[in-house]
Amino acid sequence: MAALAGVVAAAVVLAVAELLGAFFTARATPMIALGSTFIDFTPSWLKDFAIATFGTNDKAALFVGMGLTIAVLACALGVVAYRRWAWGVLGVLFMGGVIVASVVTRAGVGALDAVPSVVGTFAGLLVLRLLVARVRGVQTWPEVPASAAVDADPREDAPRPGASRRRFFAAAGITAAAAGLAATGGRLLGAARSNILQARDALQLPAPARPAPAVPAGVQSPVPEVTPWLTPNGEFYRIDTALSVPEIDVDNWELRVHGMVEEEVRLTFQDLLDAKLIESHVTLTCVSNPVGGNLAGNARWLGLPLREVLKQARPMAGADMVLSTSVDGFSASTPLEVLQDDRDAMLAIGMNGGPLPLEHGYPVRMVVPGLYGFVSATKWVVDLEVTRFADSRAYWTERGWSERGPIKTMARVDVPKSFAKVPAGTVAVGGTAWAQTRGISKVEVQVDDGEWMEADLSAEASLITWRQWSLQWEAAPGQHYLKVRATDGTGEVQTDQRADPVPDGASGWQSVMVTVQ
Ligand SMILES: Nc1nc2c(c(=O)[nH]1)N[C@H]1C(S)=C(S)[C@@H](COP(=O)(O)O)O[C@H]1N2
Ligand SMILES: [Mo]
């Protein structure tokens, strides 16, 4: 019962903070702040394990793990508080202190944002006090002395033990239900108070001064179920360290370009709307994508070439890197020359015809063809510092990943799926392949130890988008392994050398086991 008291008290801490949090910064509630702090301290092998195991559900998995950890700690604290109240108080204050520390150290969070966590901690302490008192009040039936007369039960006047126990469970239950209501209310209130989503939906983007080149017919693999060539926004993979999506008001958004520049530049969102925008299809890829994985997506982006912004700022001699920083503290190091050459790296404000979705960087993000996202695709970007690789390090570089990240050539089988069972005869095989800025010139498939067979390539839209492929395979009954490899536009064959995603991207050939019946 004391353990349960602890868990209920912890729920009250979180719920009260969630409810009050609706009136403070969205990133300042205990679960978000604790989780974000945990993410920042996650070693890269654990981050990699989480993405490999849970994919884009890694955030849900983190919350479940945090919930279990908090529940176990709360059980222990409940028991401690029952045995020694003073120690219980110390324990709760310590945990409250950890929460407050993680809240106030988040980027873009002020000292005042600690209020919900502080109030929550004291509410939890109060509830723990009341529940522990109830646990202590629970009576046990006194032992009946063997010598007692049969007709004189000394327990006659004592309250029944069941009654006080029931009173405890009722109090715990009611408190837990109230906490649930408060947390839900806080969520709804927070959502209702935020008008960023409405502002985004109402936003009218200008037509590009230079539209995207027409997509040739036949970019889609003829094999059904191959991933769509253009990824719809709702299906676009999402990878970031942001547990709560930053909510940015376009009227307050500003990009500061500074550092080793002749002229510091400040851009407002209106400046972007007024500028000569371009549109182009670019395939984004995540460095954490395992061989055969789906952390890649292709969209049509609308934005201002970073080349133009840098032209205005005039980088100084010796600068070789731009450190882009997000409002939530994430940063990426991108080679300066990559942002200046003709690959059209951009400050993007549009994705597939509309404003950026909140999760994909609204209102402004970077899109840089040819580089993995962790060194280039900063979402919710607010700061560009022109600097040198020798002087500054980005978020993931501090955590053991590479400071540079050109995309490695990769071919992927989408159909048939691994472990699929297919009927013997002609089997349609298909998938996609990418080697952004180099393009794909060949895709080959090998069945077991047979000859490499050349796949049919779908039409090529550009060197910075993925390219689909297909192959008709005469399949004989039995178990077979299909291996796939691509050759990039320079003639280089994808390496069969297996490498983990850490530190600069996975490599190796995907192998798919298929049972032909
Ligand atoms: N602010 C911010 N931007 C970020 C990240 C992040 O964690 N925070 N992750 C990067 C990584 S690792 C990738 S792969 C891309 C993914 O972009 P997407 O979520 O729009 O697909 O965003 C990049 N931009
Ligand atoms: Mo990534």
Image (spheres, rainbow, N blue to C red):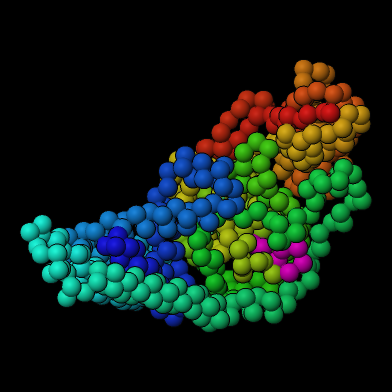
Q: For the N terminus, give its image quadrant.
A: bottom left
Q: Nearer the viewer, residue 3 or 444?
A: 3
Q: In terms of image quadrants, where is residue 291?
A: top right
Q: In terms of image quadrants, where is residue 103?
A: bottom left
Relative image position of residue 229 (x, y in whole percent): 80, 50
Is 268 rendered above or below residue 312? below
Residue ID at (15%, 60%): 143
Q: Nearer the viewer, residue 118 or 107?
A: 118
Is 392 rendered above or below residue 151? above
Asked if the magenta segment contains residue 352, the reply would be: yes
Q: Nearer the viewer, residue 343 or 331?
A: 331
Relative image position of residue 419 (x, y in whole percent): 73, 34
Residue ID at (91%, 47%): 218
* Left/right of residue 319 with respect to residue 372 in the rendered view: left
Q: Which residues are magenta?
A: 347-354
* Left/right of residue 58 with respect to residue 480 in the rendered view: left
* Left/right of residue 150 with respect to residue 23 in the rendered view: left
Q: For the C terminus, give its image quadrant.
A: top right
Q: Is residue 305 visible?
A: no
